[in-house]
Every structure is written in C-alpha cells, then in structure tokens.
Amino acid sequence: MKLTKESLRMGESSVLEFKAEKARSDSIAKEIAAFANTQGGTLLIGVMDDGTVEGVSDRRVEQRVVQICRNNVSPSLIPKIEFVEIDGKQVLAVEAPRGPNRPYKVKTSGKFYIRAGSSSVEPTNEELVRLFQNGDLVHFEIKPVHGAGISDLNRSYIDEYFSRYRSIDDTVETEEEFGQILYNLNLTDRSNGEEAPTIAGMILFGKNPVRYLPQAGVKAACFGGVDEAADILEMKEFNGAVRDVMDGALRFADRHSRTDVRFDADDVRRTDTEQYPAGIVRELIANAIAHRDYAIWGATIRLFVFNNRLEVRSPGALPDTLTIARMEAGVSYHRNPIIMQTLKDYGYVEKIGRGILRSNRRLRQMGRREIEFNDLDVELRAVLHGA
C-alpha cells in the first residue's frame, strides 16, 4: 500500500488502522488479530485517529510491536514491519496479512476480533465457527448435533456400510462395541457426557437430518426457461441419509435431461447423447455435499435445471487453500473429510480428486463447454451447460 499524507485523509478502512505511539499493547494486539482474521491490513503507528501524522519519537517501538505480535496475539505471528516517512515524519507501518492459523485472539482477554469496515469487532458465534473451520483448526462436521441421539441414525444403513465398505460384520458382538466404532469413526460425539451423532454422522446416516440440521439435504427445481423467473415445472426436496439424497437428486436430474439420438451417415449406428451426463452430475452433487460449509445454518444445496444448463449451488465460499484453478487441475481439499470419505466408499466421487479434471476432459471430447465455476463468496456455483 502506497502511503501519503493525502491517502491518510481518506481515513481508516477495512485494511487500514491508525494508532498513536503510546497506544496500549492490547489495543495494538486487537487490530493485528482482527486483520489476521479477516483480509489482512496495515496498522500505522504514529498517526492519530483523524489522520494527523505525529510520527514516532522512539524507534524501539518496532521491537515493542514485534513482542506484542509474539506474546499478546495467539497464535503468535510475525508481521512485515518498516518505517516509512510521511509528511517528513517517521511512521511505523505494520502489515498483518490474512493469517493461515485463524482464528487469532488477544491472549490477555481471550477475545477474537474481525475487521468490519473501519472497526475491529468481536465475531458472532457463527462467524467464529467459520473462522475455526476455514483456518483448518477444526472440522465442523465432527461437532455434535444437540438434541439428537443414536436412535436418529439409520441402523440398517450403518450395518450395510460397515459390512460392505469397512469389513466390519460379525466382529461386532455388543451394542457397546458398536457405539465405540461409531465414536472411533467420528460419527458420534461424547464431549457433553452423552452420546450424540456428529454432523457428519447425521448427514451420512440420519433418518431425518433436517429435523436437527436445516442446512441438510438438497432442494431441486426444474424451470421452463433460462432463469429463475420462468415457470417451475417440478420442485422436490431430498432429505434423509446421504445415499437417499444422492439417489433422489440424480433421478431428478436424469428426469429433466434430454437425450439426443443421432445416427451415422449410413443410418445404422446410433449414438445417444445426454444433455446432462449422469456421471458428471453425480460428481457435482457429491462434491457439493462433501465441500459445502455446514456452519451456514439453514442454507441448503440447490440443484437447478434450466432449458440450457444445470446448476449445483453449494453454500459457502471455497476454502482458503483452494482456488477454482486448483480445483479444475485436480487439487483436492476436503472441508468435510469424513463425509468425503464415505461418498468415496459409496462410489459417488473419484477416489483421488480427479473427478472434475476427468469430467472436463469428457466434455471436451464431446465438443462441449467445460464446467463453469463461480465463487460468489456466499456460495459456489457449478454450471454444466447443455448440449
């Protein structure tokens, strides 16, 4: 950021904060933590709130800031620090990037902060959960579903999964042993003294997940035109265990996928071309279930079929370590690794992260456009264009 006297007159912003040289240590730590938890930013020490440049009189303030970042911010971080001259005075510029170990907090108070406009504020509970999740410190899917019990899981589906994919069959002799296996696989949680399904357990094997998790399941709609203003030809909601959701959504897409029949020049050889190839649709829906942000309460995955395209809309932005380019190149990041592993076991997604890569290759061979991804911050949209 280029700093001038004129730029300071614009005032503080989401990426710029002013502090006097004698500002309290915790006040500095608060701003550093807020920047690191959000999009990063620069703290100018020696500039008053109104943008007046007073400068710093003691260059030892640099070492003080280093110690604050190491001792007053947790996890500790090392920002880029340099003295800059503004209006003939020395100002200490402390550049705090978006941190990889979010969330950061002020150690003495134990409080977390994020940047909201020109202020540093405490995050809401939902925002804090998402900070933990996106910082890769905890997977939200292993959180317990409060109010639910083991009886809310579909035992027959679990037994079948254990037998077919985990080689656990007649080795389970007691209910206690069965419960221990569920716990070991992170399908249940015991942190509150009672055994409850985790979010992953409920999404994968729940009898009626939406009773406890309004964000579960898939909502599907077929429109009679090219946008959402067109008439709705059919609308369905698919809930229950993940296999029921997947199968229902796939049948819906297949029902509204036109099949073009072509014959060769001799009118002998027949070629059937799906408008929305089932294998590619399966990959998109399964990836949405595996990668969506379950910390976003009440927002479901949406499957929309239009005259000219099929869209899968998944709540939440891409995780910080993943970009659309990396995803298209086959780089995988599992926001919900337990859910992803089970979908792999069921055969809904590629086992080594090549699903999108192979889907695009198939589309190119068919002379079709590749899958279009749009990261809208609040949701990720995957667009499969029709033939």
Image (tube, rainbow, N blue to C red):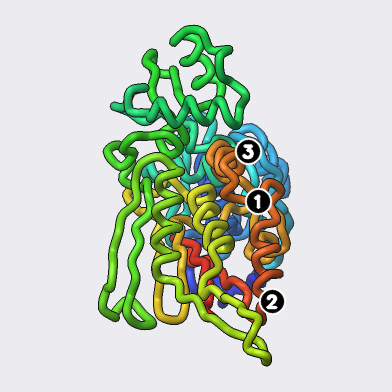
Q: Is residue 192 left or right of residue 372?
A: left
Three-letter code, disc 2:
Arg
- Mark 2 nearby-residue class (10 Å; few <14, some 14–19, many ≥20): few
> Regarding mark 2 in the picture, which secondary structure is present there?
helix
238 vs 92, nearest the viewer? 238
Q: Earlier in the sequence, mark 1 or mark 2?
A: 1
Q: Secondary structure at mark 3?
A: helix
The residue sitting at 73% across, 56% down in the picture is 82
Q: Is residue 51 above or below residue 296?
A: below
Q: Would you name the residue on which mark 3 appears? A: 68
Point out the frontmost of discs 1 and 3.
Answer: 1
x then y, percent, for residue 335: 56, 45
Residue 35 visible: yes
| Crowding at mark 1 (Cα within 10 Å: few <14, some 14-19, many 20+) | some
Q: Position of residue 178 (x, y in %)?
A: 48, 15
- Could you tell whether 78 is left or right of 291 in the image? right
Q: CA distance from mark 3 to mark 2?
A: 54 Å
Q: Quadrant of the C terminus?
A: bottom right
Question: In terms of image quadrants, where is residue 175?
Answer: top left
